[in-house]
Image (cartoon, coloured by chain):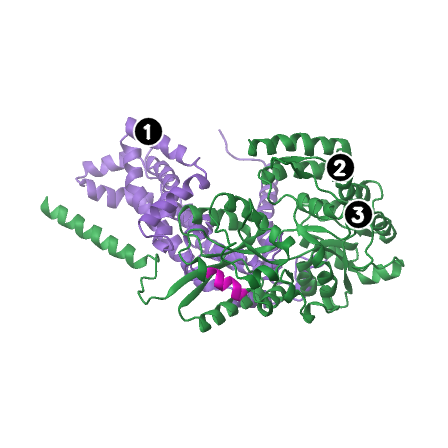
Amino acid sequence: MSLRTSRPARAGQYAALLCYLVFLAFPFLWLISTAFKPAPELGSLHPTWIPENPTLDNFRQAFDEQPLLRAAGNSLIAALSAGVIAVVIATPMAYVMARHRSRLSTAATGWVVVSQAFPFVLLIIPLFLVLKYLHLINSLWGLIMVYVVWSLPFALWMLVGYVRAVPPELEEAAAVDGADRLRILVSVTAPLLAPGIVATALFAFITAWNEFFFALVLLKTPEKQTLPVVLTHFLGAEGASDLGPLAAAAFLATLPSLVLFAVIQRRITGGMLAGAVKS
Amino acid sequence: MRALVRTAAAAATALALLLTGCGGGGDGRADGKIRIRFQSLAWQKESVDINKQLVKEWNASHPDVEVQYVQGSWDSVHDQLLTSFEGDEAPDVIHDASDDLADFAYGGYLADLRTLLPDRLTADIPPQSWQTATFDGGVYGVPFLQEPRVLIANTKILKASGVRIPTAERPWSWPEFRQVTKKLTGKGRYGIAWPLKEPVSVTLNLGLSAGGELFHRGADGKVTLAMGEGDQVVPGTIHDQVNTDHSAARTALGMGGGDTLPGLFGGKYAMVPLGFSYRQQVVEQAPKGFEWTVLPAPAGSEGLAQGVSPQTLSVAEDSPHKKEAVAFIDFLLRPANMVRLAKGDWMLPTGTAALADPSLHTAERGWATGAALATALRSAPAQSVRGYPEWKDKVATPALQEYYSGAIDADELRKRLMEDGNRVLARYQR
């Protein structure tokens, strides 16, 4: 059976893909455009894609009004820590769940799925009380703990899939060649799991980087606040907003995720398993 | 085995030390100083600067009571406060709006300030303002800033049309207002744009001017919904402007206040009804040469009356330093300071002494028009009604949106607001 498609069909596919990309990129491109527009252009009845008089005033004002760098630093600490800790905990758990199927692992998988259905509001007050008991209110470590707990079920879910994609025959072959259990895990399984681990860490990072409500509730002092919380300081009552500086700050807030994606994109989509097993 | 236990204990200790080191709970200093947290919702730069400056001035003059400024946000204040109250971590001094206080007041989270407030402050703020923060006989916040809804108009279009320019002394009546918007409508231009993304508060608050009450409290204290003639005036006018006269832009019905400004600047709308504080956005965003003016909202049988939900300062019931917290509020709301706060937020102070400040009576940027409306401001009709948020979201918002767009008529609106509404309220008043 041939997988080749005709030229018109391929052109149609590319056109559809382009439309989808434009659709996805629209909010971001508009955000960039807004960030560089002076105030009168923001209030124009006929807005333009390219600012007529581009300005950096919105960025200056955003930095002047709010401690964006400090907030970005806090977000970075929280998100990086959450990403790393989540994969460190989830990887061995996922391995066990994927390789040793039992009633317990089935039940654990079910619980992971169910846990995703809990709404924030149901969790926040018990979580708040637990963290208060641990003296971790207004602490980045408290927030990191919450982020790890919050992202762990999905991270586990993702990693189980990646582990199952690693053929057990490879591990068996390594064992036949004399490698012990640890050697097999470190030298055979771990490298093949690397794209999955990176993708999972990225998921946990982005979840934590964008998270707003837990950070709002758990962090009290301005010195500890994260970027999403600080961004709301550009919003007033009844939907009023300081649009220019808000767009500038929001644009800056999206950059780390974009850069991270750009850097590790290949590792996620690398197809490292290609040709690993003879069929 | 013993080694394993030792290692685990060491790891646990290290983790505990690490967590303690990173924790922020409590300042741990035993210098006898009282520390109170003031959560402010100020968001515009001028306003934030003034609030911080006032905190600085307080701290400089009160070495025994240190106030810490904490930035909150309007967007999420209710959920954030609710969680803080539940976790006994609420700030001592809380900035909010009076229409958000009812749940917290009835829930016992806020301190009743009646015995704590100094006479000066009590006397300075008029009774109708105190009414906005009074629930079940207790006072749970100090109302300090408020804003009427005004008409921001394109001066050139207004003058060219030859219509009578209204003043606070001689405002337009609702029927005259409808005639005026027809006159202001021309090719490619609407007389008015009603930004009614959230139609309920606008309708109810402006409805007071025509004697609209909608919520009626019986002798037993229970509230029922009844729609009289006065309640029809404002929704009827808006409906007719959109659907009969075509003098109001249909597309604006789904907009927020700020969304209508480009249309105002571009001459698409001659007027927009907005909160008084929107003047700041007009000043910032209007193109060079744009001439604008502030007009009072139309008046009805009750004159210029309209409902407002002032910004408030409250004290947490669990605060161990209520006396100091109220002293700080009193400092913050001294007449001169209240004027600074009002100017920073482009709003009106509630305090009589502050409102008399000459700087708030200049014609420039419409300050005088706003100040002239201050005495006509009343407590928003529904803010102390339990079940109001649910009625607003589930019944009134969709019903009014459909009515304004012409999808349902006045009878259907009345039926929905009253019949469905009373069922909702009844659940809260059993």
Whether labels 2 and 3 share one chain: yes
> Mark 1 sits on what residue?
A107
> Mark 2 sits on what residue?
B228
Q: Chain of mark 1?
A: A
Residue A191 located left or right of residue B402? left
Magenta region: B325-332
Q: Residues within 10 Å of mark 3 (few under 14, many from 20)?
A: some
Q: Relative to the observer, which residue lies in front, B110 or B323?
A: B323
Q: Residues within 10 Å of mark 2 (few under 14, many from 20)?
A: few
Q: Chain of mark 3?
A: B
Q: Residue type at mark 3?
A: Ser
Name above or below for residue B203 compared with residue B430.
below
- In this view of the protein, can residue A195 be seen by the observer? no
- Dot placed on the residue nearer the N-terminal end, 2 or 3: 2
| Letter of the chain shown purple in the rendering | A
Q: CA distance from mark 2 to mark 3?
A: 13 Å
> Mark 3 sits on what residue?
B301
Name the residue: 73% across, 45% down. Answer: B207
Of the chain colours in the picture, the one used for chain B is: green
Q: Residue furthest top?
A: A103
Quarter of image, res B151? bottom right
Q: Secondary structure at mark 2?
A: loop
Q: Chain of mark 2?
A: B
Whether labels 1 and 2 share one chain: no
